[in-house]
Image: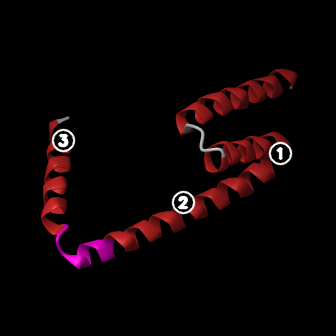
Amino acid sequence: MVPPAVLVVVIGAVFAALTRYPLTHVVLDGIGAAAIGLSLQMGLVAGRRAIEKGVWPTILMLLAFIAVGLLHLSLPLVVVVLGAVGVALAYRDLTRA
């Protein structure tokens, strides 16, 4: 626990020292844009996989998008609820086979 905690404190101190420079903000804007692009790519890959797996995974993915993205519901709540629904559906499918 100590090494990661020390690393976080050091990174925070370096960031605090560099915030007065405009280049720091440009770099952070670029990192933010890259993070958005990676998140979008991961969402597209997950969407493709959900469609390949069937109707229920696609519906659950769309419900999660609507709940978090449009209705601004709590992500942990959505994950718990839809995760439980997904596990129940998978269990149902396994017991049928």
Callout 3 secondary element? helix
Q: Badge 2: how crowded within 10 Å, few (<14), some, or many (20+)?
A: few
Q: Which mark is residue 54?
A: 1
Residue extending farthest right:
96
Specify which label sits upstream in the sequence, 2 or 3. Answer: 3
| Above or below, comparing residue 63 to residue 81 in the picture | below
Disc 3 versus disc 1: nearer the observer: 3
Compare marks 3 and 1 and give the one earlier in the sequence: 3
Image-quadrant location for residue 48: bottom right
Position of the N terminus by quadrant: top left
Mark 1: secondary structure: loop
Q: Please give the name of the residue rendered at 82% of the width and 21% of the height, measured from the top-left corner.
A: 95
Kindly check if marks 1 and 2 are in contact, taking CB atoms under 8 A apart as contact. no
Position of residue 27 measured from the top left corner of the image (x, y, whole percent): 31, 74
Instruction: Indicate the amino acid at tag 3.
Output: Ala
Quadrant of residue 74 within the rendered picture: top right
Q: Residue at x 67, y 42 (%)?
A: 67
Q: Is residue 82 above or below residue 17?
A: above
Q: Which residue is mark 2?
A: 39
Magenta-colored segment: predominant secondary structure: helix
Q: Is residue 26 above or below residue 96?
A: below
Identify the residue under disc 3: 5
Image marks 2 and 3: residues in contact by CB distance under 8 Å: no
Q: Which residues are magenta?
A: 19-27
Amino acid marked by disc 2: Ser
Q: Nearer the viewer, residue 40 or 54?
A: 40
Spatial CA span between label 2 and label 3? 26 Å
